[in-house]
Image: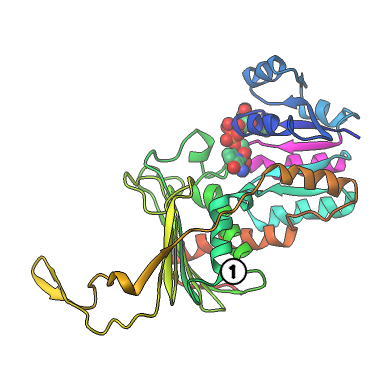
């Protein structure tokens, strides 16, 4: 059976979804609605029906699923209308702007019995899955510190991403992925406290970056940082265990893992620095450490839509659980609160 999908908001990300779904059996994008006539023209050029309103799209009985890829402030209203019109709904991240709206969306799903899911596609990022694997494999010993960073140097792209009322800013744009990844990495582990700062280097209306320190109840400290004025990027991941350190440089997954081999290092030769000498910071002797390969992990984002289809057909549960989405939303609210007060916020 082929499930037909309509797209609301045929912009940049919608094009990505359209291409991806061409590779998925059982799902076909047939039409789109966008407030911008030029985007509708493009949809027609790409073989889609261009609806002349949201109502027209929602009234098309052949559509079983609606993908919402509009700016963030419009997700809640469109999603609730779509579910009440009898459609299953896939919403782009961030699901919406706050938890109150999210609860309204969840209520619509419960009332109508329609699938409501969120495109948390970065759960399929291989660099993230490598970190999960590194923690699981245990070669670093007990992990006590994780740093997750995304750096760029072009400020915030686009128009609506620079506007607060449309849900702009980097916490909602990238934080939503990175916090979700940390929660996925430590299932069932509570987050005790949050301390955050937000930056306004290129944009005064929304955060153009942020730095968040999270303390998990298992003692792991996590730094989550996004910067858009970083002309030299720090590594995507930096993971510290009591026995070693792993670095993953960027999305290309290059990096290394270095672990101690238990050789006695008592004859440390101090290193001479610019104007002094230090044993503490002297490099390791070669025979006391070894470099081991990073794990090889493969993932396929098509699994997201395969799961959407299987969920609609009642064969699987949704991989993206709504309480997980709500938890990330609460965390983003805590980040804004902590940054506004410059205080540590208790979380769970
Ligand atoms: P975009 O600006 O390229 O596209 C948005 C489109 O929605 C535009 O064509 C605009 O005309 C249209 N639009 C605006 N308001 C509308 C409305 N009320 N009804 C119908 N159409 C409307 O933005 P984008 O980069 O494609 O982002 C869209 C969504 O996708 C956002 O929620 C964003 O956060 C998300 N996104 C997710 C990822 C990811 O990796 N998961 C990546 C990029 C964007």
* Residue at point 71%, 48% (across, down): 118
* Residue at point 30%, 69% (across, down): 286
Ligand 1 sits in quadrant? top right
Residue 208 versus residue 237 in the image, above or below = above
Frontmost residue, 235 versus 216: 235
Frontmost residue, 284 versus 195: 284
Q: Please say whether residue 71 is visible from this viewpoint.
A: no
* Residue at point 60%, 58% (across, down): 180
- Dominant secondary structure (helix, strand or loop) of the stretch shown in magenta: helix
Residue beneath label 1, please? 136
* Residue at point 59%, 53% (across, down): 297
Q: Please say whether residue 57 is visible from this viewpoint.
A: yes
Rendered image coloring scheme: rainbow
Residue range of the region highlighted in magenta in the rendering: 64-84
Q: Position of residue 257 (x, y in %)?
A: 43, 63
Does the magenta portion include 65?
A: yes
Q: Quadrant of residue 302?
A: top right
């Amino acid at each position: 059976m082929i499930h037909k999908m309509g797209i609301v908001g045929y912009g940049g990300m919608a094009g990505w979804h359209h291409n991806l779904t061409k590779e998925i059996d059982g799902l076909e994008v047939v039409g789109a609605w966008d407030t911008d006539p030029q985007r509708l023209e493009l949809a027609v050029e790409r073989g889609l029906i261009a609806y002349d309103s949201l109502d027209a799209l929602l009234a098309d009985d052949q559509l079983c699923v609606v993908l919402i890829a509009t700016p963030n402030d419009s997700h809640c209203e469109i999603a609730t209308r779509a579910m009440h019109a009898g459609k299953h709904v896939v919403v782009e991240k961030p699901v919406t702007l706050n938890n109150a709206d999210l609860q309204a969306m969840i209520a619509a799903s419960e009332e109508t019995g329609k699938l409501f899911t969120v495109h948390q596609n970065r759960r399929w990022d291989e660099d993230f899955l490598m970190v999960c694997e590194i923690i699981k494999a245990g070669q670093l010993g007990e992990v006590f510190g994780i740093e997750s960073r995304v750096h760029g140097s072009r400020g915030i792209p686009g128009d609506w991403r620079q506007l607060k009322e449309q849900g702009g800013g980097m916490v909602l744009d990238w934080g939503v992925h990175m916090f979700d990844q940390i929660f996925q990495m430590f299932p069932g582990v509570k987050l005790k406290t949050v301390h955050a700062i937000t930056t306004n280097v290129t944009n005064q209306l929304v955060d153009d970056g942020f730095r968040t320190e999270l303390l998990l109840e298992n003692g792991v400290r996590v730094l989550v940082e996004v910067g858009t004025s970083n002309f030299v990027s720090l590594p995507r991941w930096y993971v510290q265990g009591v026995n070693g350190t792993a670095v993953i440089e960027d999305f290309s997954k290059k990096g290394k893992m270095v672990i101690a081999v238990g050789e006695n290092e008592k004859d440390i030769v101090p290193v001479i620095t610019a104007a002094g000498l230090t044993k503490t910071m002297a490099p390791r002797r070669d025979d006391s450490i070894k470099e081991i390969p990073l794990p090889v992990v493969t993932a396929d984002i098509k699994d997201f839509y395969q799961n959407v289809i299987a969920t609609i057909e009642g064969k699987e549960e949704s991989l993206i659980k709504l309480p997980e989405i709500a938890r990330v939303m609460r965390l983003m609210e805590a980040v804004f609160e902590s940054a506004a007060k410059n205080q540590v916020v208790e979380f769970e």
